[in-house]
Image (spheres, helix red, strand yellow):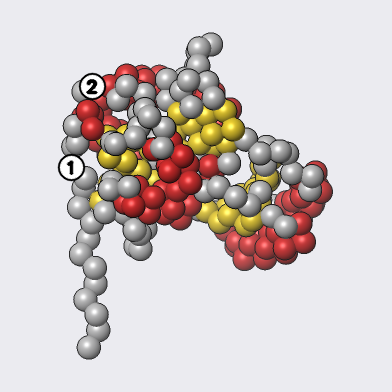
Amino acid sequence: MHDASPAPLLPPPDPSAAGISLFLDFDGTLVEIAARHDGVVVDDSLRALVRALAEGLDGRLAIVSGRTAAEIVAYLHAADTAPPFAIAGSHGLELRWTDGRREAPAHPDALDLILTAFAAFADAHPGVVTEEKPFGAALHYRGAPDAADACDAFASRLAAEHGLELQRGKMVAELRLAGGDKGDAVRRFMADPAMAGTTPIFLGDDITDEAGFVAAAALHGWGVQIGDTPLTTARYRLPDVAAVHRWLSHIAGVSA
C-alpha cells in the first residue's frame, strides 16, 4: 500500500498587521526571476507596496535575500534616506536593522581565486554567468541548463578546497562563507524588541528559504511557499509573484 500524497497547501489567511512581523524573499517572491541575475526590473508600484507594508507594520518588515543588502536597497528604496525595513543580505550573512545597526563578516581571502576560477569556467561553458558578492561568488546556469551538473561539481570541488559553503538555489551554485542562513536572520530580527512577541511570517520560493520557514514555525509563526515546489516545510502556498503582491496589499491596506 502506498502512502497517501500530502494534502495540497492552501493559500494563507490575511492576518492583522498589528500582531505580525513579515520576512520576504526577493527573487521569485517579490519579483519574477529574470533570465540573468542582473536583469531584474522593479517598478514604482512594488516600491510603494513595500513602503506601505513597512509603515503599516511599524517597521516589522525584513527583506531576506541571497542578494547583497546594497542591492536590496537599490531595488526597493530609491531614496537617500535609510530604508524603513530591515535587510538580511547574502543569505543572512549581512544584517541591517531599521535603526541603522549593521553586521557583516570579513571579506573572504579566497574570493579573488574563486572569481578567477568561476570566470574561466563560464568562458568554457557558454550561457553560464558569474556573479561577485561581498562574501562569495555564484555560477548562474539559467542560460545553460545542460551545464547544471558541471556547475555543481565544479563549485563543490572549490568549496572543499577553500573551506567555503556551497549554497544551491534555482539554477545557481553559490560559494559563500559558512555561517548564517535565512533562519538565523529570522531569529536575530525576532530577538529585537521591535519584533519580539509578534508572529513571524516568512515568504519564499526556493530551497534557501526552507531555513526561514523552519525558524518562523519554531517561533509560533508560519511559512508561505511561492510556486509549485512539491516538498516544503511551509504551512501555506501562493502560486506566483502576482498573488504575493495581492496578499501583501491586503495586509498593507492598499490596492493591488
> Is disc 2 surrounded by few (<14), some (14 to 19) or many (20+) residues within 10 Å?
few
Residue 233: mark: none
Residue 119 vertical position relative to residue 168 in the rendered view, above or below:
above
Q: Residue 145's x, y, as percent?
A: 57, 58
Residue beneath disc 2: 254
Per the image, the residue denoted by label 1 is: 13
Residue 217 in sight: yes
Query: Marks 1 and 2, how far apart in space?
Result: 17 Å
On the image, the x and y values in percent for residue 215 come to: 39, 50
* Left or right relative to 239: residue 174: right
Q: Does residue 192 lie above or below 44 as drawn?
A: below
The kind of residue on which mark 2 rests is: Val
Residue 241, placed above or below residue 42: below
Which residue of the protein is positioned furthest toward the bottom in this rendering?
Answer: 1
Asked if residue 36 lies left or right of residue 216, the reply is right
Task: Tell me the residue at 53%/42% (across/down).
Answer: 92
Label 1 is placed on what type of residue?
Pro
Which type of secondary structure does the marked residue at label 1 adopt?
loop
Residue, x 34% and y 58% (percent of image)? 233
* Screen quadrant of the C terminus: top left
Q: Nearer the viewer, mark 1 or mark 2?
A: 1
Locate residue 24: give its quadrant: top left
Q: Position of residue 44 (x, y in %)?
A: 40, 19
**Circle 1 residues within 10 Å: few <14, some 14–19, many ≥20:** few
Q: Which residue is drawn at 35% across and 43% down?
A: 202
